[in-house]
Amino acid sequence: MGTNGKGTTAVSLAAALEATGFPSGAYLSPHVLSYTERVMLRGAYVSEERFAAAMGKAIAVADANGVPASQFELLTAGALGLFAEEGLSWGLLEAGLGARHDATTAAAPEAVVLTNVGLDHTEYLGETVEEISHEKLASLAPGAVMILGTDDPRVAEIARQRCKEIDACLVEAGAGSPLSADLPPYVARDARLGLRSAEVLLDRTLTAAERERVVRGIPGALPGRFEAFEVRGVPVVVDGAHNPAGMEAALEAVRSLYGERPLGVIFGVLRDKDVGSMLTGLRKQARVLVLTRPEGEGAADPAHLMREHGPRDREGRRARVEADIVRAVEEVAEEIRVHSGVVLVTGSLRTAAPVLRWLHER
C-alpha cells in the first residue's frame, strides 16, 4: 500500500519470489488498456478467457448470496480465486484507494509493504500526511510484518507507534542496493523496495542472478509508467503521474534520462486532483504546455483549467488547449522537434491510455 509506486513494487516483489522458486502472482490496479492487467500469474498477465471466467464466478457467488459488491470487491475476489486455482506460494495484492476499508484487507496479509505517503484522495483519507498515514496503517493486523519503504520521519514515527500497539514487526527497508539496469529514478526506488521486501519475506539475501532476472523484466511491465516511444524522431514519454509527488518523480526521471533537452508537456488530469500543485511543477520545466482531456468520467475540462489556473510555460507563455489527446501529441512533437526536445504525456493514466493505444497501433 502507499500513495505512489505500489504497482512497480508489487511486480518486483512477485518477480523476486518467483525467481527464487516460489510461484507468485500479483493483483494490480488500476488497469490502463485491458482489465487483464489486474492479475499477473507467474510473471504474465492472465488471458481474457481465464480472467472473464474467474470474474464470472465471483459475480455468481455475490449474486447467489445477495451481496451488493462493488466492482473493486468483485475484482479482488476474482483475483484471489485465480491465485488459489494456480496454487501459488505467494499472492501480492496492491491496495486500492485506502487501506482501512480496502477490499484487499480481506486476504488477512501476513506482511504489508508501505511505499510512501503523499497527499492524494484527501477527501477520503485525510488532509495531512499524518492523517493519511494513520488511515493506511489502520489495516495492519497484529503479528504481521510491516516493511516501510519511506524515510519520511512523520510516516516512520506513526508506523513505529502502530506496530508497537498491535505487536507487529517493523522492518525499515532503507535505500536498498543499486540496480544494474538504467531505470528512471523512481522506478529504480520502487524496484529496490520490492527486492528488499522479498529478502525480508525469504529471510535471505537475493543472489546477483536473481536480482538481475527481476530487473530485466521491469521496463514495460506496467503500461503508462514511464514508457518511452518515438514520434517523428522525437522521444515521447507516457507517464500516468496523477499527484504532485508523482509529477515531481516523472520530471526527475525525464531529466535523468534526457538531460536538459527542451520539454513539451501534454497534461490531462481528473477533477479531484491537486491540479494547482501539479501545474506549478510543470510550469518550471515545460517549454511547451498543452492542456487536454483524459478519457472517462471525472476528467477535468482543459478550458476550465485555463480559466481557473491560467498556466504558463517556463518562458511565461500561456498554455494552450487541445482536447484531442492524440492530436496534441502530434502537434507538440512537431513543435519540439526543431529544438531537439522531448515530449511528456502525463497527469493521469486515463490520459496515458488513448496515447498508448495510438502508439501501439501506428
Image (cartoon, rainbow, N blue to C red):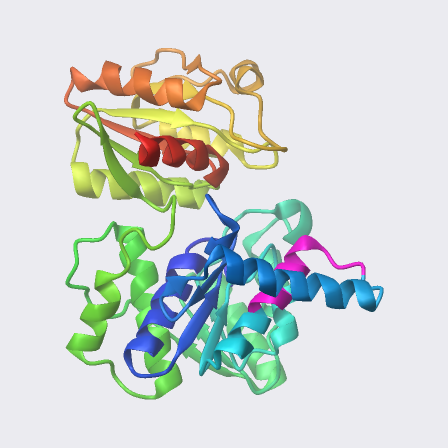
Question: In x, y percent, where is residue 17?
Answer: 35, 78
Q: Is residue 325 visible?
A: yes
Q: Looking at the figure, which quarter contains the C terminus?
A: top left
Up-down relation of residue 133 to residue 313 (above or below): below
Identify the residue shown where x is 42% and y is 36%. 352
Question: In x, y percent, where is residue 146?
Answer: 49, 77
Question: In x, y percent, where is residue 179?
Answer: 19, 64
Up-down relation of residue 311 to residue 148 (above or below): above
**In terms of secondary structure, what is the magenta stretch mainly?**
helix
Identify the residue shown where x is 19% and y is 65%. 178
| Residue 66: in magenta span | no
For the residue pair 306 and 95, the one nearer the viewer reads as: 95
Q: Residue furthest front?
A: 49
| Residue 73: in magenta span | yes
For the residue pair 344 and 137, the one nearer the viewer reads as: 344
Quarter of image, res 63: bottom right
Side (left or right) of 16 relative to 81: left
Quarter of image, res 161: bottom right
Q: Which residues are magenta?
A: 68-79
Up-down relation of residue 338 to residue 80 (above or below): above
Identify the residue shown where x is 29% and y is 82%. 20
